Amino acid sequence: MRFVKLLRIPLFTLSFVFPTMLISLIMAIALDEKRMIAAFALPMLAALLLCPPVLISIKKDPLQLYARDGFFVVSLSWILISLWGALPYLLAGAGISWTDAVFESSCSFATTGATTLADIEALPYSLLFWRSISHWTGGMGIILLTVALLPLLGVGGFQLIKAEAPGPEKEKITPKITVTAKVLWALYAVLTFIVFILYLIGGMSVFDAVCHAFTTLATGGVSTKNAGIAYYDSAYIDTVATVFMLLAGINFNLYYRMLRGKFREAIDNTELRVYIALFVIASLVIAFDISHHYDSWGTSLRFAAFQTASFITTAGIAITSYDSWPALSQTILFILMFLGGCSGSTAGGIKIVRYAVLYKQAGNEFRRMIYPRGVFSIKLNNRMGRKDLIYGVAAFMFLYFILIALTTLATAASGFDVLTSLSASLSVLGNVGTGFGAIGPGNNYAFFPAHIKWLYSFLMITGRLELWTILVLFQREYWSS
């Protein structure tokens, strides 16, 4: 009976995606995109019929959320919204199947730059906008938006954020979790507006600037052009995208602390220092390695920095054929697919902090071999780290690589080569989008069979929710206790 009551919250989360679909509907009406009017109106009508009675039920019979409830609510919310968000693709009259529609919607909300669509520019403007704003909404988190704008729920909002937020440690930056959610969304919106203005200055149209600003800050990677950002062939636009992809890959909590004058916390942040160091080193090494491919060092550095930022933040954008680069550069980019950005950012992947924790623990194990009676702890951000953090990180890494292995096997069993299979598995679970082999630059996911696309759709949501949130629902103890 409790789970039936909990179902009200995932149903009500549709109301928070409703305004973004409403904007798309208004655009379809203004541009006289007749087919898209129905494609947006029907899902909105379904949400309008569902949400008011659900809200009344919640207000009459509020439910306190416990830690275990957060997993169920968040998982179901993301699955439901991904299915609901697939309806405009299905009803658009563009020949998109239900499987591909769910894949596109899952890509959008999970901020994965993958697609099955061959001709992006042939799509209606309203659908392109829906595709971009879905990335933006998913970037900061649908549940985070729910917690920010709906204290009426009367539930423990922190349980929802803990189940959704990326990274091994969840924290509140203000005493009230609703205030925390509003602060993070405000920072996200401000950064989006800034990059929108910078894209306008670079020569993009208003529509393209809006859509690219959404996907850059969400580290989603989709575009309104078939060639992506490479369409503009602009060093200025590439530089803006590189900088803001990197900014989006940083823990948003640090921005809030810096705005309050706590710059020391950013300077002392272990993850941020490793993140910046990896970006700088990888960019310089690749730039030297590909320097003979381009006519100037500046051009080499521009492409190297962009692709490094794209891979490490899981934005998955390609502005050049990196699959023709030397083996060293390709290998570095491939390794970056295993990393991901910072915890608390819009980036996907494993997250830098987990590698930092394991690196420090490996050092402790060496010291323990030399001093068997010694007691050693890891230090993060100049503070002692909890021992249970190490256990959690180790378990996460084990599950992550097991899922990669199983997905690679499933893809290979469907007839694909090992590079494509491994690269696609890393790409969907890490929410990267692009990769190597058959999913390299200029290619998409249309050629995969339906069952692989459904598997990838599930994995994109699972990766976006940091594995635990969904996988815990497959444990017998979760349902029996």
Image: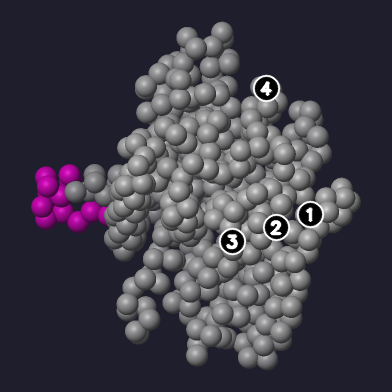
Of circles 3 and 1, the one toward us is: 1
Dot 4 alpha-carbon crowd within 10 angstroms: few under 14, some 14 to 19, many 20 or more: few
Identify the residue under disc 4: 233
Query: Considering only vertical position in the picture, is 362 above or below 176?
Result: above
Q: Which amino acid is tagged 3?
A: Ser
Name the residue rendered at 71%, 77% in the picture: 51
Mark 2 element type:
helix
Magenta extent: 366-377
Work out whether residue 194 or residue 329 is closer to the camera in this orientation and state it.
329
| Contact check, label 1 and label 2, Cβ < 8 Å | yes
User: Is residue 91 part of the magenta span, yes or no?
Assistant: no
Q: CA distance from mark 4 to mark 2?
A: 34 Å
Of circles 3 and 2, the one toward us is: 2
Identify the residue under disc 1: 35
Q: Which amino acid is tagged 4?
A: Asp
Question: Which numbered circle lies on residue 91?
Answer: 2
Question: Which numbered circle lies on residue 82?
Answer: 3
- Decide which of tag 3 and tag 2 comes sooner along the chain: 3
Q: Position of residue 409 (x, y in %)?
A: 30, 48
Residue 148 location, quadrant: bottom right
Q: Which amino acid is tagged 1?
A: Arg
User: Is residue 370 part of the magenta span, yes or no?
Assistant: yes
Dot 3 alpha-carbon crowd within 10 angstroms: few under 14, some 14 to 19, many 20 or more: many
Name the residue rendered at 46%, 45% in the picture: 448
- Decide which of tag 1 and tag 2 comes sooner along the chain: 1
Mark 4 element type:
loop
